[in-house]
Amino acid sequence: MIGITSFGAYIPRLRLNRMAVYQAMGWFAPALALAAQGERSMCNWDEDSITMAVAAGRDCLKGIDKKALDAVYLASTTLPFADRQNAGVVAAALRLHPQVLTADITSSQRAATTALITALDAVRGGSKRAVLVAASDKRETKAAYFYELWFGDGAAAVCVGDENVIAEFKGSYSVARDFVDHYRGALNPYDYTWEERWARDEGYAKIIPEAVRGLMDKLGITMNDVDKLAFPCLFKAEHRNIANMLGASPEKVVDTLFDVCGETGCAHSLMMLVSALENAKPGDRILAAGFGQGCDALYFQVTEAITKLPRRNGVSGSLAQKKTTDNYMKFLKFRNLIQTEMGIRAEAPTQTAMTTLYRKNDMILGLVGGKCRECGTPQFPKMDVCVNPECRAVHTQEDYEFADVPAKIKTFTGDLLAVSVDPPAKYGMIQFEGGGRFMADFTDCDLEELQVGLPMVMTFRKRSEDKNRGFVNYFWKAMPAPGAAEMMNRISFAGKVAVITGAGAGLGRAYALELAKRGAKVVVNDLGCTRDGAGMESGSAAQRVVDEIRALGGEAVANTDSVTTPEGGRNIVQAAIDAFGRVDILIANAGILRDKSFVNMEPENWHAVQDVHLNGAYHVVRPAFAAMKEQGFGRIILTSSSAGLYGNFGQTNYSSAKMALVGLMNALKLEGMKYGIQVNTVVPIAASRLTEDVMPPDILERSKPEYVASLVAYLVSEACSENGRIFTAGMGHYSRAAVVTGKGIALTQDGEPVEPETILEHWDAIDSLDGAKEAGSLTEALMAMMQA
């Protein structure tokens, strides 16, 4: 069996919003509005067809033995060198063995499928065991032109072989037609194009069906034997028409990716094939075609081996890792379509020493350093003496490839004086995992997202260009690992232990799940009582939440002690220490309701609510505070209520307890400050056992506990520096509340108390909150009064 054994793709991170072109140049070419939907992929200034081919090749070779490759075929119509083998540069960057056959296949938009058929024939004939086929294009157009919007930059790659085949090759059929819908002369940078109707009616509409039907007749199949049909076409309506003409229903037709990246030149037929493969399942039959001065049609059947292929970035991964820009001027500068002053620093000599490039080829193109045989220390560059001060062995360095080794930023800068097409020039020291470091240029990033410790990956890019001699220098740069900046800024509770009371449902459950998802080990406390605290619900509410956390891969234990006694509070905190060795976070969330008008408020109902809310907080906070004080870190959240801050009819017991918690916070924040303990209060509005039949149904529906959980998670994180604050949260709205004191007025008469009539006379000034301020402590409040 022969066929495709692996696949990969690369679409540059940058995307140009097509509307940006129209907004900039619509005054000149108003018809651009017809093509200004979606976005096109665009190379960064340091990318070209070779760097993209290397990126797609690296993606394709994940989990593949590079030593088994016999050949590399590079298909492109935009190769940087007319007389230097571009495939050889790709092979060197991929660190393939020197005996590999390299070949450039070019001059047609179907060069990729031609290269693929050539590779398959070589493997079937037995002269080759495994071949890497890479296709890459970065086509240039003049500014303010339809094709500037239609084209996109990208690369795709497949491995062909006779072992571990994921898509068996069943056959191919080719048609050669010297049909010229466009051409580019040897000395011309841009295509000369004929009108679109000619390309559509005489090209796509006739030549593609001819090749596809020829393949089906050759193999004795019909469109019923095809699950996925992949072929490029610049015109969406014509793409649909051709599919209809061939009898392919819409669900069989692979998306052209036109709206999300544009057509990536000769790479596009492989790009669509890769897109089909990454969504394929065993047994799927794929018919793929490449168009250009004829058409190649190929037929594959997916095998069970595709389920064992390691995950790769592919088309979908590249599309997800995008950064869209509306900066059309940046696009023009990156494509050298506008000339700008680069300053005298750009006049430095750029001639490349070919002898040095050859002698250092492994280091420059393959990013090969050394690793000491004696102590195992990697280093870059490779040298005679080991850099390990404990070793210092001489002539013990073996080749060590750094290209796929993860790294992190040690130091970095944004240099506005250095020459850069995309200033500031971003570079810094990177430290490789396991050892080795060097000063690297950074690419595909903004200065704002760089930070010490940010995970980086290496990428093969243009380092400089000798425009006078037409020579491009390539080297490796560092770029943030996909999603690394977001993960660096992601709040994590790894290694932290949280205790949450009243966590069997509602808000407490939401807190527990959110913290657990972010790595916290959680003690889920819930007595399992009804809303008024008088009865018990069936089953263990706390255990159900623990089971949820464990199902998500987290760690948690259940506790059913009551917060209403000192023993219960101690047991809850001790459960965290016994299970996880410490307590870092306490969220006092337990609560009950016993609403009655004040005259009907019996002592039993008064004390029951106070015991859970106020005394319950005291019982659990006190032992937790002691543990946090000893370890020098802690985060405590008390739960108040709008009923406490502002009052609510029939809730005198609840309101007084909730406002008392604010007082507890105000004192506790001062005691915990020097021990690294922060205490804040949250005032939530959320659907819970306490509010399920109190709130109107529409408000209840919008009051998801998860809205409040987001705020609480931030407040208990190390990223938060707030202390002694009150925050409200509900229905996605967040705000801060505070006790403030008005500016007031000083009224004295020779040190004697003033008369009530004087108070009346100045009541507006006394009552005003203009210029009101909050005090951080009793001392601050007294000082403000004394100063007044």
Image: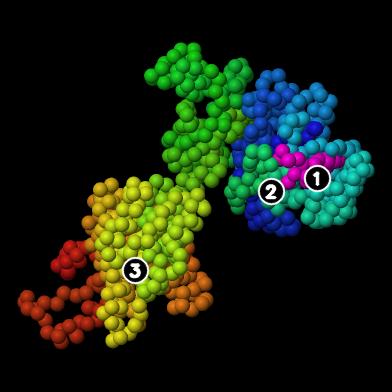
List x then y, in percent, for residue 646. 33, 76
Q: Nearer the viewer, mark 3 or mark 2?
A: 3
Say which quadrant the N terminus sits in. Answer: top right
Say which element carries label 3: loop
The disc, 3 or 1, on the residue closer to the chain's N-terminal end is 1
**Residue 304 lies in the magenta-colored region:** yes
- Residue lying at 41% horizontally and 51% vertically, measured from the top left: 521
**Residue 342 lies in the magenta-colored region:** no
Q: Which residue is disc 2 drawn over?
A: 261
**Nearest the eye: 715 or 142:** 715
Q: Which residue is disc 1 drawn over?
A: 285
List x then y, in percent, for residue 250. 80, 56
**Nearest the eye: 214 or 269:** 214
Task: Using the image, determine if residue 700 lies above or below residue 398.
Answer: below
Q: Give the range drawn in magenta.
A: 281-306
**Nearest the eye: 705 or 605:** 605
Q: Could you tell me what secondary structure mostly forms the magenta stretch?
A: strand
Task: Using the image, determine if residue 525 lies above or below residue 13.
Answer: below
- Residue lying at 64% horizontally and 34% vertically, measured from the top left: 62
Measured in 3D between alpha carbons, the distance from the residue under mark 1 to the one under mark 2, in whole angstroms, is 25 Å
Determine which quarter of the picture holds residue 744. bottom left
Q: Which residue is disc 3 drawn over?
A: 640
List x then y, in percent, for residue 768. 27, 77
Measured in 3D between alpha carbons, the distance from the residue under mark 3 to the one under mark 1, in whole angstroms, is 62 Å
Determine which quarter of the picture holds residue 300. top right
What's the residue type where badge 3 is placed? Answer: Ser
Task: Using the image, determine if residue 728 lies above or below residue 328.
Answer: below
Determine which quarter of the picture holds residue 86. top right
